[in-house]
Image (cartoon, rainbow, N blue to C red):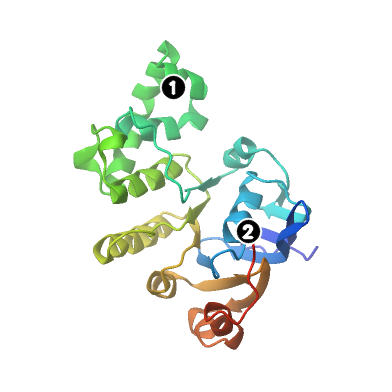
């Protein structure tokens, strides 16, 4: 494996994932510098979500390595990777519908609680003590993502866009060093997308590295410092937004001329 640069927070080295006989990722090597906003793009089925899953422990890599701040985390369970400072949002929103916005964010902070997730769900005495201790931080995060006026609203009663913001707040509640956002503006209107773009910049200003999967090219080109492009589970391009925009392989992949994966 190549030496890790002093400013690299995350490296994947020849990362591969095979499901049965299907190769979803093939030898993907990515370097993420601490404090940057980096995007991973590609056609539907290119392996982008599988890439996130392999980093966060949701699926076990078939080969290669994932290194976080110099430590090999390949194959660790998700909760151990989260404890090391990796948080993510998901395409498919998973709020606790019967809990308020504040309660959802407090559950997102369970990694810092003595009572654990079960205590949060059961609202045990230990959880209530944790809740009081962490209430201020949760309130700040709710305001940070624009949900201050909705903090007592049940998650099930939020709009789709508001639920996306709640998902980000819950991820930030872990106090991550690196935040992985899986299609954060999918299904959003231009105003909501603009808010998320501003939000990502503010996350960076807090010293958090941001790694994004996104199909909205206006957002990707507008906020990314560097971009990696996947097609059929393989890395086909990397560079600045200007370099990627003019790359012939990328153009062919998006126009249907490139190889296409069967799994994402």
**153 left or right of 238?**
left
| On screen, residue 35 above or below 162 | below
| On screen, residue 14 above or below 157 | below
- The Cα–Cα distance between marks 2 and 1, rounded to whole angstroms, is 35 Å
Q: Which mark is residue 136?
A: none
Q: Secondary structure at mark 2?
A: loop
Q: Which residue is at a point 41% across and 54% down the rendered structure image? A: 206
Q: Which residue is at a point 59% across and 72% down the rendered structure image? A: 229
User: Is residue 67 in view?
Assistant: yes
The residue pinned by badge 2 equals 263
The residue pinned by badge 1 equals 120
Q: x and y percent of residue 225 in the render?
A: 49, 72
**In front: 123, or 253?**
253
**Which quadrant of the view contains residue 150?**
top left
Q: Which residue is at a point 46% across and 71% down the rendered structure image? A: 224
Q: Secondary structure at mark 1?
A: helix
**Mark 2 or 1: the one toward you:** 2
Q: What crowding class fits label 2: few (fewer than 14 Cα within 10 Å), some (14-19), or many (20 or more)?
A: some
**Which quadrant of the view contains residue 135?**
top left
**In front: 125, or 253?**
253
User: Quarter holding the C terminus?
Assistant: bottom right
**88 left or right of 167?**
right
């Amino acid at each position: 494996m190549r030496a890790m640069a002093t400013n690299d927070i995350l490296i994947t080295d020849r990362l591969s994932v095979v499901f049965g006989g299907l190769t979803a990722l093939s030898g993907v090597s990515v370097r993420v510098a601490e404090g940057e906003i980096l995007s991973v793009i590609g056609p539907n089925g290119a392996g982008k979500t599988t890439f996130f899953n392999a980093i966060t422990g949701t699926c076990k890599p078939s080969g290669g390595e994932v290194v976080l701040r110099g430590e090999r985390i390949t194959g660790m369970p998700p909760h151990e990777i989260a404890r090391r400072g990796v948080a993510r949002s998901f395409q498919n929103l998973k709020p606790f519908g019967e809990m308020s916005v504040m309660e959802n964010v407090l559950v997102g902070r369970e990694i810092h609680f003595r009572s654990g997730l079960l205590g949060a769900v059961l609202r045990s005495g230990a959880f209530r003590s944790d809740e009081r201790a962490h209430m201020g931080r949760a309130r700040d995060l709710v305001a940070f993502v624009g949900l201050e006026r909705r903090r007592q609203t049940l998650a099930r009663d939020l709009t789709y866009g508001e639920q996306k913001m709640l998902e980000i707040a819950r991820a930030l509640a872990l106090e991550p060093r690196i935040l992985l956002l899986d299609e954060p503006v999918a299904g959003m209107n231009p105003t909501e997308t603009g808010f998320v773009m501003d939000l990502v910049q503010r996350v960076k200003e807090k010293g958090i590295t941001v790694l994004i999967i996104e199909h909205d090219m206006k957002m990707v080109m507008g906020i990314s410092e560097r971009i990696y492009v996947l097609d059929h589970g393989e890395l086909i391009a990397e560079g600045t937004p200007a370099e990627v925009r003019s790359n012939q392989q990328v153009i062919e992949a998006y126009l249907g001329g490139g190889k296409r994966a069967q799994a994402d």
